[in-house]
Amino acid sequence: MFEFKLSDKVRSLKPSSTIAVTGRALELQRAGVDVVSMAAGEPDFDTPEHVKEAAYAAIRAGKTRYTPVQGIPELRETICAKFERENGLTYSPEQVTVSTGGKQALFNAFFALLDPGDEVIIPAPYWVSYPEMVAFAGGVPVAVDTQPENGYDLDPAAVARAITPRTRAIVLNSPANPTGAVYGEATLRAVAELAVKHGLLIITDEMYEHIIYDAEHLSIARFAPEHTLTINGASKAYAMTGWRIGYAAGPQALIRAMNAIQGQSTSNANSVAQWAAVAAIQDSSAFIASAREQFRRRRDRIVSGLNDLGLPTPLPQGAFYVMADTSRIHASELEAARIILDDARVAVVPGTDFRAPGRVRLSYATSFENIEKALGRMGALLSVSAR
């Protein structure tokens, strides 16, 4: 049998732990095992009806062909209007690109920006894909740790200490996956000043901007527009994860480079989904408000429930995740996640790849019933282990 060699680059790439846990939970469910999945970061609400109707209309009108690589003009214009209306930011359509999900926009940005050995500062705990993308593009991820005691807020002084002559960019994610942290104005201003002072790019992932409970969303691009690439998308706010629409706005030269990369890889995002995204971004305020209130109730319940079980869990300000200290179950978060899945039949994500030792991530983007069931099963597990 012919044996071929995979590249060193791809062999060094780690698979997503979130996807791995979700896949394992699905395997058990297909085998007839009753598993409560608290792993996937996917709203459990259906896509709004007016968004689906826009997709049907696009299909009926024959809008099913290739589009410009950077996205249809109507969507880019809608995105510009959204930024001005909701974020106080002014962009031209030429400064906007549409991709197959926010993940592709990030991927394109890192490959457009980084040369081998270039460093990218990433606050931790972080979304598992940031450091992997940076490394895959030839860069070096540099973690700046945050702590649960202060809600995982970012210390600009720690960011400043991490800057070296090789630093090219700073990644921000607010509200954050996996911690739910929301950075305030003082923090954002300080990081923006660092970027301007040192000539760095800020890559800000604002995918969860509409899912904030106890604070206001503020984009760092307000303070350093020429130094900021803003990433967003339709997945979380409008329950459109499978539609795969992401977008980015920022310096036009960087956007052109990202378009060139996308043009040689996937070309345009799905044409019908782009028209659906126009409808979603233009008018979904009622849907967003309803979803946010349901997420708030779920957040309050799961945080209080986990703390009552003796699993210390900070109250997140945004997104739909909590980070629970599982040292009571096992010192290793990997082993704790395995025990919770195998013995309690609850799927959670170990904090290992998030750079969150001793903790697991639970997503409350699921029904109140599932949250109660998960808490009950974990409570029973802890009762047995305490005997």
Image (spheres, rainbow, N blue to C red):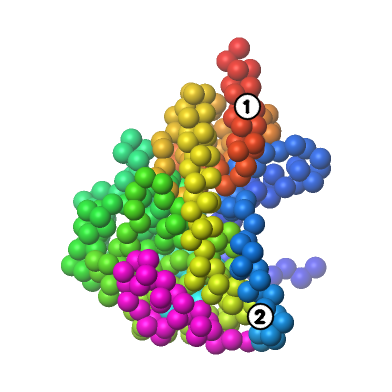
Q: Nearer the viewer, residue 220 or 195?
A: 220
Residue 34 painted magenta: no
Quadrant including the C terminus: top right
Residue at 48%, 30% (x, y): give it. 304
Instruction: Please provide percent x and percent y for residue 148.
Output: 37, 38
| Callout 2 secondary element | helix
Please tell me whether the stretch drawn in magenta is mainly helix, strand or loop.
Answer: helix
Q: Quadrant of the N terminus?
A: bottom right
Outermost residue toward the top in this view = 387
Kind of residue sitting beneath label 2: Ala
- The disc labelled 1 sits on which kind of residue? Gly
Residues at discs 1 and 2 in contact (Cβ within 8 Å): no
Foreground disc of the pair 1, 2: 2
Q: Nearer the viewer, residue 8 or 118?
A: 118
- Disc 1 designates what residue? 376
> Which contiguous range is marked in magenta?
66-95
Separation of residues labelled 1 and 2 (CA atoms)? 46 Å
Q: Is residue 20 in view?
A: yes
Residue at 64% from the left image edge and 77% from the top image edge:
272
Residue at the left extreme, as displayed? 197
Residue count near mark 1 (Cα–Cα under 10 Å), binned few <14, some 14–19, many ≥20: some
Circle 2: is it few (<14), some (14-19), or many (20+) Cα within 10 Å? some
* Residue tagged 2: 58
